[in-house]
Image: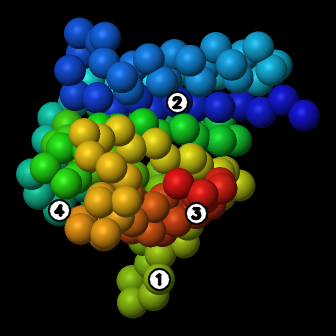
Amino acid sequence: MPKRIAILQAHPNPSGGHFANALADAYAEGARAAGHEVRSIDVAKLDFPLLRSAEDFYQGVAPEGVRSAQDAIRWADHLLIIYPLWLGHFPAVFHSFLEQIFRPGFALESGRGRMPKKLVLGKSARIVVTMGMPGLFYRWYYRAHSLKSLERNILRFSGVARSGPH
């Protein structure tokens, strides 16, 4: 059964030509060849401000590029997220993007005094982390904290399920 796939490619350099770009392109090509629909989001090419206050996060309006990315995520059955490991974590521009995307009203419905309601349900995700070190070292030394943070604190908290091993 064909799936709708949103690819979030999060290398911070908008000029392209990086391994993350090649992986995203190859995945999109393979998915389309298998009959799936694909939408790609190149985070570095989006224009959005940093969120600087809780008020911005809770009551602010997402910029147009962010709303387009939210639409692609809503549309998708499956998310592929690709980012390079920088200083043991994902790049700052990707973190800022996640703050813009996974805000109340899109990712969750805030409830006073109770757990928020998850709003991004029925989706799976695969996360690919590129790095200049062996994956075992990343898991052992860094305890894969950027991957765990993204998976647990953002995706799962919003309702997105993990798809297979990472």
Which dot marks residue 57? none
Q: Of the two numbered discs 3 and 1 on the same chain, state the one appearing first in sequence.
A: 1
Q: Of the two numbered discs 4 and 2 on the same chain, state the one appearing first in sequence.
A: 2
Q: Amino acid at mark 1?
A: Met
Taking the image as shown, residue 53 lies to the left or right of residue 76, namely left
Residue at horizontal 76 percent and vertical 23 percent from the top: 36
Give the CA distance from mark 1 to mark 2: 29 Å
Which is more toward the observer, 30 or 42? 30
Quadrant hosting residue 14: top left
Which dot marks residue 115? 1
Q: Of the two numbered discs 2 and 3 on the same chain, state the one appearing first in sequence.
A: 2
Q: Nearer the viewer, mark 2 or mark 3?
A: 2
At which x and y percent is residue 151? 45, 61
Q: Amino acid at mark 4?
A: Ala
Q: Amino acid at mark 2?
A: Ile
Q: Residues within 10 Å of mark 4 (few under 14, many from 20)?
A: few
Residue for badge 4: 54
Residue for badge 3: 159
Residue at horizontal 76 percent and vertical 14 percent from the top: 33
Give the CA distance from mark 4 to mark 2: 28 Å
The answer to whether residue 45 is seen in the rendering is: no
Secondary structure at badge 2 equals: strand
Which is more toward the observer, 101 or 20? 20
Colouring scheme applied when the structure was drawn: rainbow
Q: Residues within 10 Å of mark 3 (few under 14, many from 20)?
A: some
Question: Looking at the picture, does residue 161 appear above or below residue 93?
Answer: below
